[in-house]
Image (tube, rainbow, N blue to C red):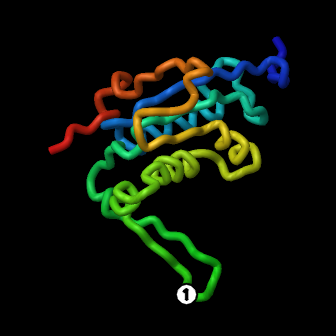
């Protein structure tokens, strides 16, 4: 039996939409990263972009457990003394709350050229509307997969 290696003609990409409202961030990011890489498909080939196009809606309503909401994101501007920090709570309440979800998914992918290409198949929206209805995406219900995927507000 020969090992199967997918070719570009063998790859079939689909569109999926995931509602992030009430879903724990890390669990959402791991499921999305798996979908982007194509690891959910039986014909997964590590060196090919086999993943689906993923649309995440309600990214501003994602949940964080423990004290993670008050932890910082750090980045550097490239200038001396240019380290910056913002808490995840500040980013979620700011004008671009989808950046928290994007960073979580990006950090779950390997750091190579293929991962950067796979990230172009990810679309994140803060609200419940998205402009990709023409692609007729299928809905993936992350909440019902496991009871730990959701967090009830206390």
The residue at 58%/49% (across/down) is 106
Would you say residue 31 is visible in this rendering? no
Farthest residue, direction left: 154
CA neighbours of label 1 inside 10 A, class few (<14), some (14 to 19), many (20+): few
Q: Is residue 152 left or right of residue 110?
A: left
Instruction: Name the residue that disc number 1 marks.
Output: 81
Residue 104 visible, this orientation: yes
As drawn, 16 above or below 24? above
Query: How far from the left and from the top, in percent, is residue 111?
Result: 67, 52
| Residue for point 38% across, 46% down | 60
Task: Classify residue 57 by image quadrant.
Answer: top left
Q: Position of residue 35 (x, y in %)?
A: 58, 30
The residue drawn where x is 41% and y is 34% is 128
Q: How many marks?
A: 1
Q: Position of residue 140 (x, y in %)?
A: 46, 22
Q: Is residue 41 left or right of residue 129?
A: right
Q: Nearer the viewer, residue 62 or 42?
A: 62
Residue 109 lies, with reference to residue 132, above or below; the image says: below
Residue 115 placement: quadrant: top right
Left or right of 11? Residue 131 is: left
Q: Is residue 124 above or below residue 131?
A: below
Check the picture and name the quadrant holding the C terminus.
top left
Q: From this viewpoint, which residue is outermost toward the bottom?
A: 80
Q: Quadrant of the N terminus?
A: top right
Q: Quadrant of residue 149?
A: top left
For the residue pair 67 and 5, the one nearer the viewer reads as 67
Secondary element at image label 1: loop
Q: Is 107 located above or below residue 43 in the figure? A: below
Residue 88 location (% of width, % of height): 38, 59
**Residue at x 30% of width, y 34% of height:** 150
């Amino acid at each position: 039996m020969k090992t199967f290696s997918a070719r570009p003609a063998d790859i079939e990409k689909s569109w999926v939409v995931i509602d992030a409202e009430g879903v724990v961030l890390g669990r959402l990011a791991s499921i999305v990263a798996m979908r982007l890489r194509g690891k959910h498909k039986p014909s997964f080939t590590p060196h090919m972009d086999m993943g689906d196009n993923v649309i995440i809606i309600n990214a501003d309503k994602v949940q964080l457990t423990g004290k993670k909401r008050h932890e910082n994101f750090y980045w550097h501007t490239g200038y001396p003394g240019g380290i910056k920090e913002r808490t995840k709570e500040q980013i979620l309440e700011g004008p671009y709350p989808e950046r928290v979800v994007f960073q979580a998914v990006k950090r779950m992918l390997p750091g190579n050229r293929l991962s950067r290409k796979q990230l172009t198949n990810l679309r994140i929206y803060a609200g419940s509307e998205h402009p990709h209805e023409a692609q007729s995406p299928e809905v993936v219900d992350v909440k019902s997969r496991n009871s730990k995927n959701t967090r009830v507000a206390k």
